[in-house]
Amino acid sequence: MPTIVTLSILTISLNVVLSAKILGLFPPPVNSHRNLYVPLVQELVQRGHDVTVVSPYEEKTDSKNGSLRSIVLTGFVEWMRDGMKNMRTFEQTDTNVFQKLQTSIAFLEKMTEMTLEHKEVQKLIHSKETFDVVIITEVLNHALKALAPHFKAPLVSFSTVGACSLSNLLVGNPSPPSYVPDIFSDYSSQMTFLERLTNSFTHLYTQVCFNWYVYPKHSKLMKKYIPGEYDFDQVIHNISIVLLNSHPSINQPVPLVPNMIEIGGFHIKPPKQLPQDLQEYLDNAPNGVIYFSMGSNLKSAELPLEKRDAFLKTFAKLKQKVIWKWEEDVLPGKPDNVKLGKWLPQSSILAHPNIRLFITHGGLLSTTETVYHGVPVLAIPIFGDQKQNAQIAVNLGFGLSLSFEDVNEEALTRTIVELLNNPKYKEIAKARSKYFHDRVRKPMETAIYWIEYVIRHRGAAHLRVAGIDLPWYQYILLDIVAVLVLGILLTCCIVAFVCKKLCCRNSQRVKIKAQ
């Protein structure tokens, strides 16, 4: 009996020691971002931590182990909705890398200021609270990083994508432009000479843009809204760890410094029981089922009429059934083999053994889920990182890509038939799925371990690489290149001068002999 009491006391004491105050800042009013941070927050609460979440949504928990306080960024969802009304999403396919970068910078700078000036955030800033760790979504919102030293806490960066220019520059992570494409580009690791040239220029342009425009802007925001004297350069480079939503089974392998941790697929939970109508529809499909969804931000109902008709005519010719995420009550001309749904449990559908193909926009979450379940994919990318994800799927061999401009009945039919009838896509998708699941520990376990690691050690300065402390021109060896170029030019000048002198001397000798 005393042993049981002792163990109980030790267990309670351990829980008290491990319980921490955590602040999570997740400002983007985008469902795909919410689908990532909510599982992480819920797991932290389940582990007994007290979590404060600053986001555009009211977050709740059923867990009794820890606590969850939600600070809602009111007005953000409406702001995003109004902006999307003026933006024809299916017409964004032809924007170039520089347009994407400039649009993102302007949008995220505005969102950062809206976050900092929000009355509830200002109330929190002036509350004199402290936290054991601050977790911030990494989306060019650098001014928010000053909240970590303000609350006397180490900083964890939460990246919804893999290693890219958004985080590489902050932790000194190498990203050779010869095979690491910029996140705003449409390239994969297998680039042509022209693509490598463009990618190199993009890398340089991004560094210049960040250092001489983005960072100064956010430094001003930091000073305007966060009391105290902070060195902005130290603030943005004082990241303990970066949690990356990536994994080599989904993304191309790239260099990672020690404090960049891959947790791709951490948000995926084991499949749940499907609603009865979907379960019966999938079970009674002797030829299999195709699942079609354009994600949470794009709406199939907004497809141009000619594109929608191309899908309808193509699906009508197939012997497979189709489940289509359609946001309206009616789809004119819907074939009998198509089932509609305004909201669909995507991961649980993909887990069904009768799913033969996933037609998607190529978003990272959808790509991750199709690899998780080992389902071949047809990617029809529109904007953002979708084209890059689609190209990776093609290069790795578990899918094909079709540009939105090329979507017509003939191209759709040809591509879908190839994916359905050629077994290599299914075989490769299953192999990628095995790579995904074969890890030392589950990705959510990895995420929690490293967050608690930072809490235990009050940061992780020992994981920082020396490159962080170098000026950007030294990091990319511009000073060395300049010295080498000057040295070569000086050598050439000396050689030219000596040659000229020798020529003049020889010329004089010839004249003397001639006389």
Image (spheres, helix red, strand yellow):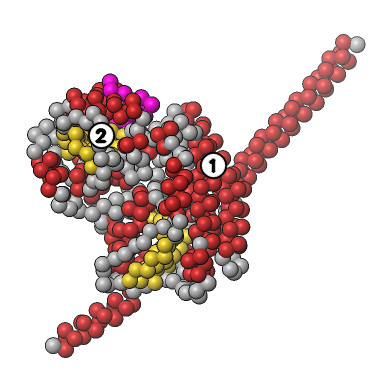
Residue to which mark 2 is pinned: 331
User: Residue 258, position in %: x, y?
Assistant: 41, 56
At a point 51% along the width and 47% down the height, the residue shown is 107
Res 311 → quadrant: top left
User: Residue 58, position in %: x, y?
Assistant: 36, 61
Please state if 248 lies on the left or on the right of 2 as rendered.
right
At a point 33% along the width and 53% down the height, the residue shown is 35
Q: Residue 339 shows which numbered tag? A: none
User: Residue 4, position in %: x, y?
Assistant: 16, 84
- Packing grade of label 2 (10 A; few <14, some 14-19, many >=20) is few
Asked if 53 appears above or below 354 in the picture, the reply is below
User: Residue 223, position in %: x, y?
Assistant: 60, 62
Q: Are marks 1 and 2 in contact (CB under 8 Å)?
A: no
At a point 30% along the width and 29% down the height, the residue shown is 308
- Packing grade of label 1 (10 A; few <14, some 14-19, many >=20) is few
At a point 69% along the width and 33% down the height, the residue shown is 489
Circle 1: residue type? Gln
* Residue at the limit of the structure toward the bottom, as seen here: 2
- Is residue 71 visible from the viewing direction of this image? yes
Q: Which residues are magenta?
A: 397-410
Circle 2: residue type? Leu
Residue to which mark 1 is pinned: 102
* Residue at the limit of the structure toward the right, as seen here: 515
Please state if 321 lies on the left or on the right of 92 as rendered.
left
Quarter holding the C terminus? Answer: top right
Please state if 26 lies on the left or on the right of 476 as rendered.
left
Q: CA distance from mark 1 to mark 2?
A: 37 Å
- The disc, 1 or 2, on the residue closer to the chain's N-terminal end is 1
